Amino acid sequence: MADAIISLDRNLALDAVRVTEAAARAAARLIGRGDEMAADQAAVDAMRRGLNALDIAGTVVIGEGERDEAPMLYIGETVGTGEGPSLDVALDPLEGTTICATGGPNALAVLAMAEKGGFLAAPDTYMDKIAVGDGLPDELVDLDDPPATTLAKLAKAKACDVNELTVLILDRPRHEELIAKVRETQARIQLIRDGDVAGVIATTRLNRTVDIYMGIGGAPEGVLAAAALRCIGGQMMGRLVFRNDDEKRRARAMGVTDLGRKYTLHELAGGNVMFCATGVTDGAMLRGVSRLPNGARTSSVVMRSQTGTVRMIEAEHDFSRAPARVGM
């Protein structure tokens, strides 16, 4: 365990950023071309190559899906050279495939690592989530509280009126009732088409463009967002939402015994955690990949839970000197 902590804190941070940079550059070549699958494939291929060059014995616990649904970077796949510490890996090579395909904001390449057993292992299903940023009283949010109760407590904690709060919600038909209840409180709503991870981070001091994230999104994105909050600070609660009996069966096979359990932030992402992301398209937190005459410029963030250190990394990649060009 000590080796894993040392490796996460001292050696892997910059190497992990190189992995997300490569995935972001590869996806960026397909921004606005309308082909979600091609953009995702490019990011997956680049991220896999980068991960397999790292001296870790990694296991993907949050990935592109389960083995029967995703041929690459699936849940349970091993990555790395096998010569380093045993780590759990959570990833989304292209968080916001639709965003990238349509040229929208806040598409990211995301990677997180934790000590073995640090991340919630669950099938690729939905998750009901609620999250707020740092600097608030403990145990402020609960999935079972009505939106009016939650927003009243948040407004009190922030010493403001409810109508001054901004709630971030995915723009989906399933959220019609939630949106209606939030509007009854007079709080503001910001709807997004995609981008759960960036949405949760938007509640923190890295961005602070919204006050709270609410609603049902992807479970993998929920775990990745929790990893970020473990590093930067904040509160989050999640509960798996199953679409059919097959998802329930797979969840039980992966060790989920209480299908209705509410998971706290530390249950979603526990122990020593590292999180990094690189912008694919421009967003509030990170700039997207931009083209240079012989290379590209990238914007990334890397964070560690043990120290709370947050590093913003601006990099210029010179393809004329690189031994092999990867992506834009």
Image (spheres, rainbow, N blue to C red):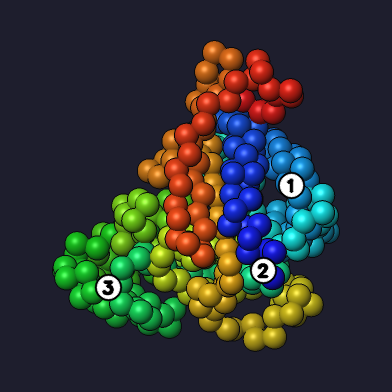
Q: Is residue 90 visible?
A: no
Q: Amino acid at mark 3?
A: Leu
Please rate how many residues cluster around mark 3, counting C-alpha atoms within 10 Å: few if below 14, some from 14 to 19, many from 20: many
Element class at badge 2: helix
Give the number of the mark in front: 2 or 3: 2
Q: CA distance from mark 3 to mark 1?
A: 42 Å
Q: Is residue 1 above or below residue 276?
A: below
Farthest residue toward the top? 293
Residue 68 position in % (x across, y down): 83, 59
Q: CA distance from mark 1 to mark 2?
A: 18 Å
Q: Which residue is mark 1?
A: 54
Q: Name the mark on residue 2.
A: 2
Please rate how many residues cluster around mark 2, counting C-alpha atoms within 10 Å: few if below 14, some from 14 to 19, many from 20: few
Quadrant housing residue 244: bottom right
Label located before the other in sequence (3 or 1)? 1
Label located before the other in sequence (1 or 2)? 2
Residue 125 position in % (x across, y down): 65, 66
Q: Residue at x 45, y 60 (%)?
A: 308
Residue 189 position in % (x across, y down): 31, 58
**Left or right of 253 on screen, residue 116:** left
- The quadrant of the image that shows the C terminus is top right
Q: Amino acid at mark 2?
A: Ala
- The quadrant of the image that shows the N terminus is bottom right
Q: Residue at x 58, y 25 (%)?
A: 317
